[in-house]
Image: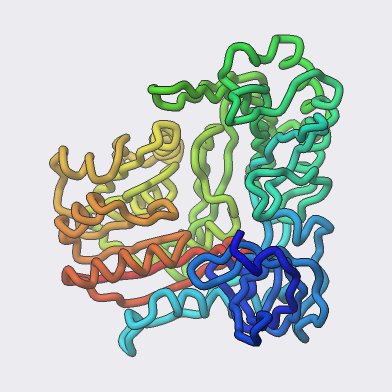
Amino acid sequence: MRKNANRTASVSITEFSKKGNGIGTTLNQNGEPWKVEVPFTIPGDTAEALLLRKRGGLFGSLLQQITIPAPTRIAPKCKHFSVCGGCRWQQIPYTEQLQNKEEMVRRYFGDLITPDVAFHPIIPCGSPWQYRNKMEFSFSSDAAKTKYLGLIIDASGGKVVNLTECHLVNPWFIEALEATRAWWEGSDLEAYHIRQNTGSLRTLTVREGKRTGDRMVMLTVSGNPDYALHRPQINSFLAAIRKAIEPPDPDCHLSVFLRIHQIAKGIPTNFYEMHLYGPDHIKETLLITTIAGKEPIPLTFTISPSAFFQPNSSQAEKLYSLALQHAAIPQDAVAYDLYCGTGTLGICMAKHAKQVIGIEISPESALDARTNATSNGIENFTVYTGAVHEILKNKEFPKPDLLMIDPPRVGLEVAGCEQIIALGAPSIVYISCNPATQAVDVAELVKHGYRLVSIQPVDQFPQTIHIENIALLVK
């Protein structure tokens, strides 16, 4: 700890940090101003905070109490708010959340937003609650062997809050959580401890098809054979889940999996999935409007337990529809869908383009993309499994007319960006869940002859600072 840290101070909040926390000032013993980041505060608040370590000219802190609330502050919906790290902005009215996010995107892109760039207003989420179709909960325990199952406590280094409610998901997610907690309490199983590689239970993943009503539960356990679950334990877990959340509608299905997470020094981490019950996937239907003003196209997607799928189905429809409308795909076009996931964009593009080439590093997602293309009657979409830069470097493809790219949060890897620039596609539609890294990549593309045409923020994750953004570039 730095000298003067670990003391309580009154902090007047004036702005947001990149994490969505409040930043304000307090005066030290010498009357000099200190900048402090205080979690779960907003501009206009005055907060009592416990000062922690100073890094980069900014003190970290823990919120003790709000002494003077900002005029716009509202009561959070969830009782775990300000403890659980899952939400950051429940204390802000939703319209204000949208304004903050739009300003964030403008700030990240900065001088890239010239008078020639069309900056479209942010697209709000239809419902700011119960919108997530997937959530991963963590198992944990303390020195007293108290068991915890829920989400990670904010700034705790991995401690878990024993969750009893979450308003970002369908209520049946919490029923699955409670059934698992009761099953765990009745067993002698322990939570996994990563440093010692001991214990059995790691995470509980729950996901659903919003339109289909399909449900999936996956219990991830340690790959250490000394802590392997035995068949009676697996059977009792399955029975508890089925009793709690088996869909009442016979047209909706429950799938249950056990995933073994194996780690060992000197070898890559491995995952092995054991299919316990129901179909080996869930299905989701999205309505995609590829041409503005036209009827949406219904597309059905198969989602495997470990495959990536946009966690907000209703906003994914808006996001993909807008991306495709921005692309304005010619009928004779050759299009690439890079980082294609389960193939949503590629399948949609294939309805208009002559040929679509998809690349996806996750074998599970790539397999789902091929399955989804077949089930939707698409024959001109070919999916390759591997890293984008390696596939583009080692295979010969027709020259693209359009690139659709949707990379992970870290943005484009250097080699991938170089390969994308070398392709020289006339237009690029860049979708990102992290406008900060997206802006860096767009600046690099602009340096190499591209022009930023438009920016379209889409709010996928109300109550959090996260936001999706679409950038259109032309050569």
Q: Is residue 72 left or right of residue 164?
A: left
Q: Nearer the viewer, residue 241 or 187?
A: 187
Q: Residue at x 40, y 54 (%)?
A: 410
Q: Nearer the viewer, residue 173 or 448?
A: 448
Q: Is residue 111 left or right of residue 249?
A: left
In the rendered image, the vertical position of residue 357 relative to residue 184, given as above or below: below
Q: Residue at x 13, y 41 (%)?
A: 396
Q: Nearer the viewer, residue 451 or 74?
A: 74
Q: Residue at x 82, y 19 (%)?
A: 187
| Residue 231 placement (x, y as % from top left) | 70, 9
**Which quadrant of the figure contains the C terminus?**
bottom left
| Residue 422 placement (x, y as % from top left) | 14, 56
Q: Is residue 437 left or right of residue 260?
A: left
Q: Nearer the viewer, residue 5 or 443?
A: 5
In the displayed image of the protein, which residue is found farthest to the bottom? 115
Q: Residue at x 31, y 77 (%)?
A: 453
In the rendered image, the vertical position of residue 376 relative to residue 410, given as above or below: above
**Any part of residue 126 in sight:** no
**Which quadrant of the figure contains the N terminus?**
bottom right
Write down the quadrant of residue 126 in the picture. bottom right
In the rendered image, the vertical position of residue 183 relative to residue 352, given as above or below: above
| Residue 54 placement (x, y as % from top left) | 56, 66
| Residue 50 placement (x, y as % from top left) | 73, 66
Write down the quadrant of residue 78 in the picture. bottom right
In the displayed image of the protein, which residue is found farthest to the top? 231
**Any part of residue 356 in sight:** yes
